[in-house]
Amino acid sequence: MLRNTEDRWGWLSKSFHWIIAFAILVMVPVGYVMGATYALEYENDNFAMVHMWLSRVHQSLGLIILIAVTFRLGWRLHNPSPNLPAGLAAYQRWLARLNHVFLYALLFVLPLSGWASLSAYGEAPTYFLWIDGLPNLVPKRPVDDPFGFSLYSGIHHFCIDAGAVLLSLHVVAALWHEFVKKDSVLRRMWPLTTGRAPREPA
């Protein structure tokens, strides 16, 4: 089923969800390794090549996330979201929705801040798959400019830390629903399943 219904996610929403999840799973460790090879690239040509390819993978995945979350949000605005399970307290419903809002915001700000930091730094291209040198998102600024690289890089790293917390809460909540509440919330988003969450009481 392509579209969402009141009790299940459609395959398009599932596809966007798992594409983003897989991209995050790969992009984050690649980003840390990329950072570790930054200083080494000046000492050895092999490290320079490794750093370049890690940068290409990290940046490409970040832009794929940006594209996927844009389409997913647009699709979600034109489709009903499945009902939250019956029996959840009002504060649990509020926290679930708030967590999703912040996750969506971070999934936009994180790749955009990374792109902006590269643009402001201006010494390295922004990669997207086989394309070298995407247009700058912001003008190049001196390295010591407080509204340049340091600002966007700081936002980028803050989003990484905040995203780790929000994503952990998201995963823990999904596992809690699956193994404690047993209300099929995880199963209805799982690929190739048609699991339904219990309907709201009439």
Image: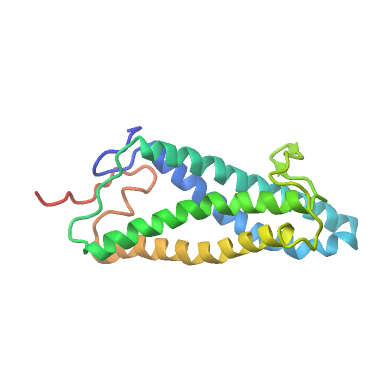
**Residue 194: x and y, percent?**
29, 42
122 and 92: which is toward the camera? 122
Say if residue 132 shows up in the picture: yes
Q: How many marks?
A: 0
Locate the N terminus and report the quarter of the image it occupies: top left
Q: In percent of the image, x 73 and y 43: which residue is there?
A: 136
Q: In percent of the image, x 51 and y 61: which residue is there?
A: 163
**Residue 179: x and y, percent?**
29, 64
Residue 76 left/right relative to 45: left
Residue that protrudes farthest toward the top in the picture: 2
Looking at the image, is 64 positioned above or below residue 100? above
Looking at the image, is 118 positioned above or below residue 79? below
Residue that protrudes farthest toward the left in the picture: 202
Q: In percent of the image, x 30 and y 44: which residue is there?
A: 81
193 and 10: which is toward the camera? 10
Q: Quadrant of residue 27?
A: bottom right
Q: Quadrant of residue 8?
A: top left
**Residue 140: x and y, percent?**
78, 49
Residue 118 left/right relative to 10: right
**Residue 156: x and y, percent?**
62, 59
Residue 1 left/right relative to 153: left
Say if residue 178 shows up in the picture: no
Q: Quadrant of residue 73?
A: top left
194 and 119: which is toward the camera? 119
Q: In percent of the image, x 17 and y 49: which residue is there?
A: 199
